[in-house]
Amino acid sequence: MPLERILVADDEESMRWVLSRALKKKGFAVDTAHDGAEALTMIQRQNYDLAILDIKMPGISGLDLLERVRELKSDLLVVIMTAEASMRNAVEAMKRGAYDYITKPFDLDVIDAIIEKAGRAREMTSQVSSLKEELKDRYQLEKTIIGNSPAMRDVYKTIGKVAPSDITVLIQGESGTGKELIARAIHYNSRRLGKPFVALNCAAIPKELLEAELFGFEKGAFTGATDRKLGKFEQANGGTIFLDEIGDMPLDLQAKILRVLQEREVTRTGGSQSLTVDVRIVAATNQELEEQVRQKNFREDLYYRLNVVPINLVPLRERKEDVPLLVEYFLGKICAELEVPMKHCSPEAMGVIMAHAWPGNVRELENTIKRAVILSSDLMLTVADFPGLQPGRGGEKVSTDDLSLEGIVDIKLRSCLANMDKMEAGDLYDMVLQQVERPLIRFVLEKCRGNQVKAADVLGINRNTLRKKIQELGIEFKKD
């Protein structure tokens, strides 16, 4: 990011005046301090990009202040000024972490050169830091987008196709389906990796403030605008801006977003100069934008500009096969965050979870798992730990029977392993067999189309034994 706010600290009023006047002419916001104590207070209260400190000031010297600054705000660039051009001062200043060192008197051209160099250094540091964070986030993201259902596989394919280009993407889906995660995945797999990813929820900001958030404002643009502020588009320059819940954006702002898409320019509130921005726009909504267009609540031209590549996220109730994967992921994540032993869901609890419609989608599931982990003192979460969960829409009954055999065996095996400390030696074999017996028999019966003679042969047991097991275990299965 470029330098914007500079602090000048010197006990000489004339030096403060000259530097402040020169820097303000260059467009910087400048504050001044007459001694080290005042400068320290200002640094604690305000965020500065650069501090120019005199080495000798009453109370706290420039070198001592530099040391305190390194502890308080390690990213603040500090230039030390001195009237004594000694090697000792120069070495000491650089050793304590000064960005540069200049001797009085100096030409203002020297200050200009230092500030230009500092701006480049700050931008490079910011890019490296951003790249590190985004690489870390990308690694985390690859573990947090969970799902192997056909619907999610289609989403992954689309991300892979659109990410390398700068094409505009519109993500549609109910609240809680993970729209921002998909937007981040697009950014982290694009050529803009290492540049900013800036997210803005259009529904979370009052309409009268939304324009200023998007486009920024100049000093004095309105009451309370005491400083210039960069908008989200400028902050995202070179990277990606994610406009969440764009369906809630007022019509007058929609026209300005359309202009950004067409002209790649923004104008700050209260300003007259158009600024070029290089951003990729990814938008998201939980509304049916086509219907909003028909009702004249959303601009048709903007809709077509945004809807170049649509990504539709299906609700969780329509990809129930992903629920066990999500449950295990959230259990691992939440237990690690809370620093508690790993917990698991009993097969019966998983059946209740599978039966719920999840109107709040993945977000509701995560919160439900978190509440159960926090309130339960047992390693095995039971049905009692999930009060209030309701069957899915239409009253359908969903249980672990609706999972694949592999999924059921995995869940039940985890259940057994979680209770190992409560079992006597040698019990695990019998316990696992008891847990997987019902889903195994049901699976074989369905594969044999209800033919019990054939199923008994496949299982290697007597037909009468099979019939007895069906009755004892209450097994229901589809027959041709």
Image (cartoon, rainbow, N blue to C red):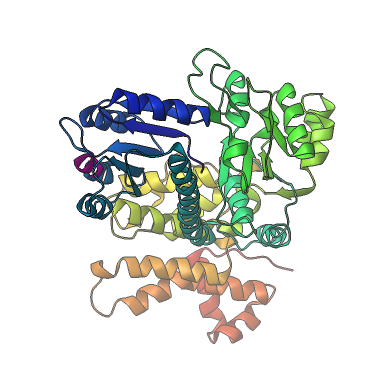
Out of 362 and 217, give the one closest to the viewer: 217
Query: Would residue 289 appear left or right of 336 to someone viewing this image?
Result: right
Q: Does 63 lie within the magenta span?
A: yes
Residue 438, given in percent of the width and then of the height, sits at: 50, 69
* Residue 290 sits above or below residue 93 on the image: above
Residue at image location 40% in from the left, 68% down from the top: 414
**Looking at the rendering, in which quadrant would you find the C terminus?**
bottom right
Q: Position of residue 32 (x, y in %)?
A: 34, 26
Residue furthest left as drawn: 59
Relative vertical location of residue 102 with respect to residue 325 in this rendering, above or below: above
Image spot of residue 297 (x, y percent): 77, 24
Please tell me whether the stretch drawn in magenta is mainly helix, strand or loop.
Answer: helix
Camera-side residue: 226 or 462?
226
Task: Measuring from the top left, give residue 161's x and y in whole percent.
Answer: 73, 61
Q: Which residues are magenta?
A: 62-66
Q: How many marks?
A: 0
- Residue 324 appearing in the image: no
